[in-house]
Amino acid sequence: MKITFITGNQHKVKEARGIFDNFGIELEHVDFGYPEIQGDLVDVAKFGAKHVAVRLGKPVIVEDAGIFIKSLKWFPGTYSSYVQDTLGNEGILKLMSDNTDRYAEFRSAVGFCTPKTEPEIFLGTVSGRIDNSELGENGFAYDPLFIPEGYSESFGELSTQEKNKFSHRRKSLEKFAVWYKDYVGD
Protein backbone atom coordinates (compact mmCIF):
# COMPACT_ATOMS: atom_id res chain seq x y z
CA MET A 1 0.00 0.00 0.00
CA LYS A 2 1.15 3.49 -0.81
CA ILE A 3 -0.16 7.00 -0.13
CA THR A 4 1.02 10.40 -1.32
CA PHE A 5 1.49 12.94 1.47
CA ILE A 6 1.42 16.56 0.36
CA THR A 7 3.55 18.76 2.62
CA GLY A 8 6.61 20.95 2.59
CA ASN A 9 7.34 20.15 6.24
CA GLN A 10 10.08 17.51 6.64
CA HIS A 11 9.23 17.11 10.36
CA LYS A 12 5.73 15.97 9.38
CA VAL A 13 7.13 13.57 6.77
CA LYS A 14 9.44 11.94 9.31
CA GLU A 15 6.65 11.59 11.86
CA ALA A 16 4.24 10.17 9.26
CA ARG A 17 6.78 7.63 7.98
CA GLY A 18 7.39 6.37 11.51
CA ILE A 19 3.65 5.88 12.00
CA PHE A 20 2.81 4.42 8.59
CA ASP A 21 5.64 1.86 8.81
CA ASN A 22 3.63 0.18 11.59
CA PHE A 23 0.70 -0.22 9.19
CA GLY A 24 2.62 -1.35 6.11
CA ILE A 25 1.82 1.87 4.27
CA GLU A 26 4.55 3.32 2.07
CA LEU A 27 4.70 7.09 2.07
CA GLU A 28 5.43 9.08 -1.06
CA HIS A 29 6.18 12.69 -0.15
CA VAL A 30 5.37 15.49 -2.58
CA ASP A 31 6.04 19.15 -1.79
CA PHE A 32 3.19 20.68 -3.77
CA GLY A 33 1.77 23.99 -2.60
CA TYR A 34 -1.95 24.54 -2.40
CA PRO A 35 -4.12 27.43 -1.25
CA GLU A 36 -5.15 27.34 2.40
CA ILE A 37 -8.62 28.75 2.81
CA GLN A 38 -9.74 30.56 5.92
CA GLY A 39 -11.77 28.34 8.20
CA ASP A 40 -11.30 25.65 10.81
CA LEU A 41 -8.84 22.77 10.49
CA VAL A 42 -11.47 20.50 8.95
CA ASP A 43 -12.31 23.06 6.25
CA VAL A 44 -8.63 23.62 5.45
CA ALA A 45 -7.87 19.88 5.25
CA LYS A 46 -10.95 19.13 3.11
CA PHE A 47 -10.21 21.91 0.66
CA GLY A 48 -6.50 21.10 0.44
CA ALA A 49 -7.02 17.37 -0.10
CA LYS A 50 -9.68 17.90 -2.78
CA HIS A 51 -7.68 20.61 -4.55
CA VAL A 52 -4.47 18.55 -4.73
CA ALA A 53 -6.15 15.22 -5.57
CA VAL A 54 -7.85 16.84 -8.58
CA ARG A 55 -4.71 18.71 -9.67
CA LEU A 56 -2.42 15.66 -9.39
CA GLY A 57 -5.04 13.14 -10.52
CA LYS A 58 -4.38 10.68 -7.69
CA PRO A 59 -5.30 9.94 -4.08
CA VAL A 60 -3.50 12.14 -1.53
CA ILE A 61 -3.44 13.15 2.09
CA VAL A 62 -2.77 16.57 3.53
CA GLU A 63 -2.41 17.48 7.19
CA ASP A 64 -3.18 20.77 8.84
CA ALA A 65 -2.35 21.33 12.47
CA GLY A 66 -2.19 24.11 14.96
CA ILE A 67 -1.98 25.10 18.56
CA PHE A 68 -5.18 26.43 20.08
CA ILE A 69 -4.84 28.48 23.28
CA LYS A 70 -8.02 28.85 25.30
CA SER A 71 -7.26 32.21 26.97
CA LEU A 72 -6.44 33.69 23.55
CA LYS A 73 -9.85 32.61 22.23
CA TRP A 74 -8.22 29.55 20.57
CA PHE A 75 -5.64 31.70 18.75
CA PRO A 76 -3.45 31.09 16.79
CA GLY A 77 -5.39 28.00 15.63
CA THR A 78 -5.39 27.70 11.85
CA TYR A 79 -2.99 30.66 11.70
CA SER A 80 -0.34 28.78 13.71
CA SER A 81 2.21 28.58 10.90
CA TYR A 82 1.86 32.27 10.02
CA VAL A 83 2.03 33.31 13.68
CA GLN A 84 5.11 31.11 14.20
CA ASP A 85 6.80 32.83 11.24
CA THR A 86 5.86 36.36 12.38
CA LEU A 87 5.58 36.41 16.18
CA GLY A 88 7.37 33.18 17.05
CA ASN A 89 7.34 31.62 20.49
CA GLU A 90 8.50 34.88 22.10
CA GLY A 91 5.43 36.65 20.73
CA ILE A 92 3.11 33.95 22.08
CA LEU A 93 4.76 34.19 25.49
CA LYS A 94 4.24 37.98 25.45
CA LEU A 95 0.56 37.52 24.57
CA MET A 96 0.26 35.03 27.43
CA SER A 97 2.23 37.05 30.01
CA ASP A 98 -0.79 38.11 32.10
CA ASN A 99 -2.85 34.94 31.57
CA THR A 100 -3.26 32.46 34.38
CA ASP A 101 -5.31 30.11 32.19
CA ARG A 102 -2.56 28.32 30.27
CA TYR A 103 -4.77 25.55 28.77
CA ALA A 104 -3.96 24.71 25.14
CA GLU A 105 -4.54 21.97 22.59
CA PHE A 106 -2.52 20.79 19.66
CA ARG A 107 -4.99 19.71 16.97
CA SER A 108 -4.41 17.88 13.70
CA ALA A 109 -6.71 17.20 10.75
CA VAL A 110 -5.68 14.73 8.06
CA GLY A 111 -7.63 15.03 4.83
CA PHE A 112 -7.73 12.16 2.31
CA CYS A 113 -9.22 12.54 -1.13
CA THR A 114 -9.19 10.95 -4.56
CA PRO A 115 -9.89 12.91 -7.74
CA LYS A 116 -13.44 11.48 -7.85
CA THR A 117 -14.48 11.34 -4.18
CA GLU A 118 -15.29 13.78 -1.43
CA PRO A 119 -12.64 14.21 1.27
CA GLU A 120 -12.47 12.05 4.40
CA ILE A 121 -11.20 13.74 7.58
CA PHE A 122 -9.35 12.23 10.56
CA LEU A 123 -8.83 14.29 13.72
CA GLY A 124 -6.32 14.12 16.57
CA THR A 125 -5.95 16.29 19.68
CA VAL A 126 -3.53 16.50 22.60
CA SER A 127 -4.43 18.64 25.62
CA GLY A 128 -1.89 20.46 27.75
CA ARG A 129 -0.71 23.88 28.78
CA ILE A 130 1.61 26.65 27.65
CA ASP A 131 4.65 27.08 29.89
CA ASN A 132 6.09 30.47 30.88
CA SER A 133 9.24 29.90 28.82
CA GLU A 134 10.65 27.74 26.06
CA LEU A 135 11.83 24.34 27.30
CA GLY A 136 14.00 21.94 25.30
CA GLU A 137 15.61 21.80 21.89
CA ASN A 138 13.62 18.94 20.34
CA GLY A 139 10.66 19.15 18.00
CA PHE A 140 9.76 22.31 16.11
CA ALA A 141 7.58 25.41 16.22
CA TYR A 142 5.53 25.53 19.45
CA ASP A 143 6.89 22.26 20.89
CA PRO A 144 9.14 23.99 23.47
CA LEU A 145 6.12 25.89 24.86
CA PHE A 146 3.63 23.01 25.13
CA ILE A 147 3.52 20.67 28.12
CA PRO A 148 1.12 17.80 27.40
CA GLU A 149 -1.36 16.73 30.04
CA GLY A 150 0.16 14.17 32.42
CA TYR A 151 3.75 15.24 31.67
CA SER A 152 6.17 17.62 33.33
CA GLU A 153 8.29 18.03 30.16
CA SER A 154 7.42 20.03 27.07
CA PHE A 155 7.21 18.49 23.61
CA GLY A 156 10.56 20.28 23.11
CA GLU A 157 12.11 18.26 25.94
CA LEU A 158 10.67 14.89 24.93
CA SER A 159 12.48 12.79 22.36
CA THR A 160 10.87 12.55 18.95
CA GLN A 161 10.06 8.91 19.66
CA GLU A 162 8.37 9.77 22.99
CA LYS A 163 6.35 12.63 21.48
CA ASN A 164 5.32 10.51 18.51
CA LYS A 165 3.79 7.90 20.82
CA PHE A 166 0.84 10.19 21.55
CA SER A 167 1.03 13.40 19.48
CA HIS A 168 -1.99 15.01 17.84
CA ARG A 169 -0.52 14.14 14.44
CA ARG A 170 -0.01 10.51 15.48
CA LYS A 171 -3.64 10.28 16.52
CA SER A 172 -4.98 11.68 13.25
CA LEU A 173 -2.52 9.73 11.06
CA GLU A 174 -3.27 6.46 12.90
CA LYS A 175 -7.01 6.99 12.46
CA PHE A 176 -6.36 7.50 8.76
CA ALA A 177 -4.06 4.44 8.52
CA VAL A 178 -6.62 2.12 10.15
CA TRP A 179 -9.34 3.42 7.81
CA TYR A 180 -7.03 3.32 4.73
CA LYS A 181 -6.12 -0.33 5.24
CA ASP A 182 -9.83 -1.19 5.04
CA TYR A 183 -10.42 1.27 2.18
CA VAL A 184 -7.63 -0.17 0.01
CA GLY A 185 -7.91 -3.74 1.29
CA ASP A 186 -5.06 -6.14 1.79
Image (cartoon, rainbow, N blue to C red):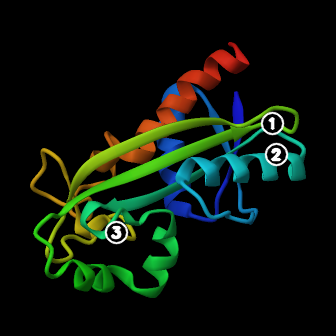
Secondary structure, mark 3, is: loop
Q: How many marks?
A: 3
Residue under numbered circle 3: 142
Image position of 25 with respect to 50: above or below: above
Report the amino acid beneath label 2.
Answer: Ala
**Whether residue 62 is visible:** no
Report the amino acid beneath label 1.
Answer: Thr
Figure quadrant of residue 120: top right
Q: Position of residue 110 (x, y in %)?
A: 57, 43
Residue at 90% x, 44% y is: 57
Per the rendering, the mark at residue 156 is: none
Q: Which quadrant does the N terminus fall into?
A: top right
Image position of 145 with respect to 111: above or below: below
**Whether residue 116 is visible:** yes
Figure quadrant of residue 152: bottom left
* Label 3: few (<14), some (14–19) or many (≥20) C-alpha neighbours in 10 Å: many
Q: Are the residues at dot 1 and dot 2 in contact (C-beta closer than 8 Å)?
A: yes
Per the rendering, the mark at residue 53 is: 2
Of 113 and 185, the residue lying toward us = 113
Per the rendering, the mark at residue 114 is: 1
Between the C-alphas of marks 2 and 3, the distance is: 29 Å
Figure quadrant of residue 98: bottom left
Between the C-alphas of marks 3 and 1, the distance is: 32 Å
